Image (tube, grey):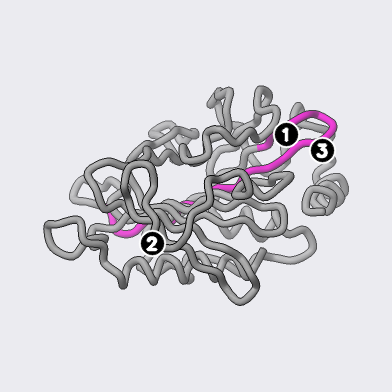
Amino acid sequence: MILFLLMLLLSSSLFLSGCEETIPGLTKSKIHRDKINHSTRFHHYELGDTEHAIFYKPVSPDFLLEKYMILRPGRQIQFSSKDMPFEVEKEEAFLVQYGSKESPSYQVQLNYYGKADDYDRYGDLFYKINMMEVKEDPFQSLTPYKDGDQDYLLNRVDLSTDEEGTTFYHFIQTTDSSYAYSSYVENEMGDVGVMTTAADEIMFYKNGVMVEIGYLTPSRYNGTERVPNETVIAERLATAQKLAKQL
């Protein structure tokens, strides 16, 4: 349903005919990748044909969500930097168009950063949202977790469900090892690059959209030991729940 409505909107306003066509108003990036970037926890989950993916240079999240309404044609997603649990100093959004010519799919990534470090670099405080169109709930094939479990690296896993029945999988690093977290970033040339780091993650599925959230904050632990800051965990989860209500 999402893809059908999306194609109706884009065909009338952007006249797309497949992944060989570009979207007016956005600039193609020089990046060339064979795979769409998404969580290494789901590297086994196939997103379809990504060989001819088109990556677009970053724009502002508000511009992407308001102008194109990629995920919810016909209405805007009421979500912005004001919903972040910290003051946002920098934000950017990426659009990736992939799949077959006859049935293209879309990926949207929204990046929100806190204050830069002493070298004007961003990355110590962020909240990044990766949203992808999928044909089925990817968590159906995931080894069932229950609240309080551990992942394969013995890190904490929290499960919760909101009033609409959406299940949130919250992966929290509590050991010295973690899955690598990769995300699109703007490089020095104003093009699309990929950054890999460690981050806590929140994932959920709703209405044909798979959402992967990665976040990092200097206050993620209490003290020098890897004891999670429960206030930070609750705030990041609440932000994810706000987004879910818009999907």
Cα separation, mark 3 vs mark 2, equals: 46 Å
Residue at the image point whose x is 52% and y is 34% from the top? 43
Camera-side residue of 76 and 58:
76
Magenta residues, dominant SS class: strand
> Is 113 inside the magenta-drawn segment?
yes
Element type where label 3 sits in the image: loop
Q: Name the residue under label 1.
A: 22
What is the quadrant of the N terminus in the image?
Answer: bottom right
Element type where label 2 sits in the image: loop
- Please state which amino acid type lies under the numbered disc 1: Thr
Does the image show residue 129? no
Report if the CB atoms under discs 2 and 1 are less than 8 Å apart: no
What x and y, as percent, mark residue 5?
83, 54
Mark 2 / mark 1, whichever is N-terminal: 1
Report if the CB atoms under discs 1 and 3 are less than 8 Å apart: no
Mark 3 / mark 2, whichever is N-terminal: 3
Specify start and end residues of the magenta stretch as a single range: 97-116
Q: In this view, does 164 lie to the left or right of 143?
A: right
Camera-side residue of 25 and 32:
32
**Label 1 packing within 10 angstroms: few (<14), some (14-19), many (20+):** some
